[in-house]
Amino acid sequence: MNRLKRVAAAAAAVMLSLSMISFAGAPVGAAPDEPARFDEFLASLPAALTSSHDLSIHLQFNDPQAFGFQAAVPEQPFTSISDRLKAGSGETDALLKSLASFDYSKLTQSQQVSYETIRDYLEMQKALTPYAYLDNDYLGAACSLPATLILYTFQSKDDINDYFHLLQTAKATFVKYAQNEQERQDKGVGLSEVSLKSVMEQCDRFAGGSTDYLIQFFDGQINAASYLTSAEKADAKQQNKKLVKTDLVNAYRTLKRELAKIKVKSPDGGLAARPDGRAYYIKLIQAKVGTRDNIEAIRQLLMDGMKMYDQKMKEIQNDPGGKLLFDQNSNLLTTDKTSVEGLISSLYESSKTDFPTIGKPKYTVKQVPAPVSAFFEDAAYRNPRVDALPTDPQLILLNGAFDRSKLNVIAHETIPGHMYQYNFTEIMGLPAIRQLIGFQGAAEGWANYAAEYAASYVPEQYRPSALYAYYETMKNYCFSALMDIGIHYDGWTRERTLQFFQEYFSEKATLDYSNIWYNTCLQNPGSYLPFAVGCLYFQQMRAEAQTILGGDFDPVQFHQELLKAGSTTFPIYQKQADNYVATALAARKAV
């Protein structure tokens, strides 16, 4: 799981542009060209859904103005709870009305998928609107700002000034975050005491730790800036050093101080203990995963999945022909490759047997700076900007040294996981809005689903270890997702959560140990479900197709049908899978 991507995926404030009005209908007397009109609508959506000031726009576009955004200084995204509730769903309703004005039957097949995807996205976001008080993503964004800053790029002097602006205004923004949390506490829906302390501890770690990595990052970017003179480079470096060590550090000290003033009125427990918490949790999970299923259906899917993975692990352990291999640190040896580059190259070639062929991606591997490593998992994939050039390298962030236990991690982030999924989407040429809106279940679920194939690509002696490591990872995701449901939907106490640990994880589990996971779930409701549920949905669709088609099942064609839909909801993926099966059955009948 990747905390960086969870922060980057936080919902932005919706702004309705005046240009949307033109899509209510075609001019009188004009012959309507529905596909062309719909393309214009899609092109208008990026600027209609996200403020031009949003920091994410700088991170996602080289030339935002080419996509309808105004020239604007980037800001950390924040809209107060009061303003969000005041705005209500009016803007979303207007977009849904504009969408409904198109004749679905006259759109191309690809446009129909975009139509359904955007409709589902808007409806799911609208469903969250009444529960703005229960959203605590903004504090995660504050703690993760340093990890976001190291993804910044400097293509002009304006970019440098914008970066300085972020450092200069961090304190004022953080004060707003604290005020927002006070407002939530007054309503009894804010962070629990332990969660609030955790945020303050993270502020302490940044304010009291080394900031050299941010200085070094900036200096490296400035050294490569050909548009600056030597004197301008020196001045920029000096100004950045001052801003980081004073303004940014003081911003975190201020945030801690302001949060410390807050008297916690919220109970120690999940969303179920808060007004409307259970109703919000249902909508939150549906939006994160991209599903219409209710919690009970999701819970059953996870229980079945956990039992399935556990059974597969036991089969490997009991197989006399398979031997688990371990390194000197007792980690499972899952690959014979000794470098990230060597493993990715091998995965690229081997995956052609199960997935449509793509061009070999250009990428760079960078180490995650130690001070921000806590905000990353073992590895992370950063896709290029929406308008990146084909020559722009993709970024793989490695958290610590590579070792031969990392097959599952690298496959998840690269091929046939996230990097593969992105590069296939590029081939499809989907409109910009389809690259901006997405569902965590589609991304993380696919990456976990596809990573299983990697275990069959390693030399035979490593396959039992590779499969075991994969099944163990997925069992733990299912376990964590079920615990998340228990805490936020069922209202589990810490003691009840320990019972769950002792029943399904280890009889020797202690309250101190289970509390670590309990606290993680409190701060990030629903964070594990897209990884587990999304993967299980993809596996379910594949199993159904294999059962119906038997020997006629073609994994390459099956995956192509799913992937060409882009990031979408699982009802739409199911339609794609059904289309594949119907086409294959028709071909069989014709023969």
Image (cartoon, rainbow, N blue to C red):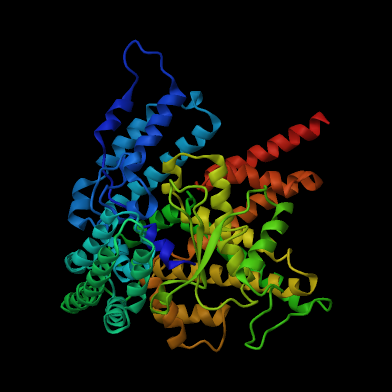
Please state if 2 lies on the left or on the right of 462 as rendered.
left
Q: Position of residue 433 (x, y in %)?
A: 41, 42
* Residue sitting at the far top: 29
Residue 300 appears in the figure: no
Q: Position of residue 117 (x, y in %)?
A: 46, 41
Q: Is residue 569 above or below residue 1?
A: above
Residue for point 36% across, 13% down: 30
Residue for point 38% across, 35% down: 43
State which quarter of the image contains the C terminus.
Answer: top right
Residue for point 54% across, 71% down: 479
Q: Depth check: give the residue in front, 550 or 187.
A: 550
Q: Depth check: give the residue in front, 409 or 237.
A: 237
Q: Is residue 225 above or below residue 389?
A: below
Residue for point 72% across, 74% down: 336
Image quarter for residue 46?
top left
Q: Is residue 113 above or below residue 486?
A: above
Residue 417 appears in the figure: yes
Please state if 401 lies on the left or on the right of 122 as rendered.
right
Q: Position of residue 328 (x, y in %)?
A: 66, 88
